[in-house]
Amino acid sequence: MKKQPLAANLDFPRPYTTVDVAIFSVAGDALRVLLVERSREDGGPFAGCWALPGGFIDIERDADLRHCALRKLREKTGLAAGYLEQLGSWGSATRDPRGWSATHAYFALLPAAAEPRAGANAAEVCWFPVIGKGVRVRLAFDHAEILAAALERLRNKVEYTSLPAFLVPKEFTLTELQRAYETVLGRRLEKSAFRTRVLATRLVEPVDKLRAGPNRPARVYRLSNPGAPVFFARPFSPRGK
């Protein structure tokens, strides 16, 4: 008996499938997350609410989930991710009032100078300061839960990786890099130990320039390998330990 093509056996209801991205940056001493305001005009759920940038997978355009995440980030905010990592998946019959849905979540890191612009069906796009495990606005769907998970993953990984280097400009001082670490972790780090750790791992390389500071000019650095994070042998210790 001749077997039927696999597609002929797929006549069953399918869930809505999306990708959402928690995008982080720093400004001053504050960690920020980028949110988009959902349209009030297209008839979709949670009209006017703030949400993580994202949207439906396009099976004709998206080769994989990562491609979809990068496309949605670009279409909704006009930005490209300096660092992008898959976070996890969320799905249920109740997270979207339109029906059973599943989303594959990512988190991204951008330098402080990144300026977004609203695109696609986003009414507005704006940076919000992170307060504890979230933000002080109501988020659509289960995005508050996804954001909390993204923050936990980021803060845990910052303890033993170079991820904050993706939150500073391409050229930076060691003081600026340390502040990025402290902003994400929410605590101060011992200056000498921090610099010893960073320089010993060859995370950065010096640039032939100095930057004026409050005391004496500071050496400028850049990442030795901007395409991948560095993993440290042990977590950072707070100042005084």
Image (cartoon, grey):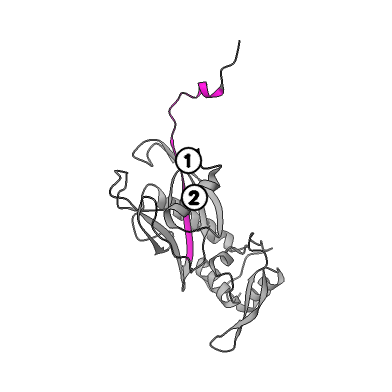
Q: Could you tell whether 183 is left or right of 194 in the image?
A: left
Rendering coords of residue 139 (x, y %): 36, 53
Q: Which residues are magenta?
A: 6-25
Disc 1 element:
loop
Tell me the residue that label 1 is attached to.
Answer: 58
Q: Is residue 52 above or below residue 102?
A: below
Q: Residue furthest bottom?
A: 215
Residue type at mark 1 is Asp
Disc 1 residue crowd, few under 14, some 14–19, many 20+, Cα 10 Å: some
Rendering coords of residue 39 (x, y %): 32, 50
Q: Could you tell whether 210 is left or right of 45 in the image?
A: right
Disc 2 element:
helix
Q: Residue furthest front?
A: 60
Q: Residue at x 63, y 60 (%)?
A: 227
Tell me the residue that label 2 is attached to.
Answer: 71
Q: Are marks 2 and 1 in contact (CB under 8 Å)?
A: yes
Rendering coords of residue 132 (x, y %): 43, 63
Quick one: quadrant of the C terminus?
bottom right
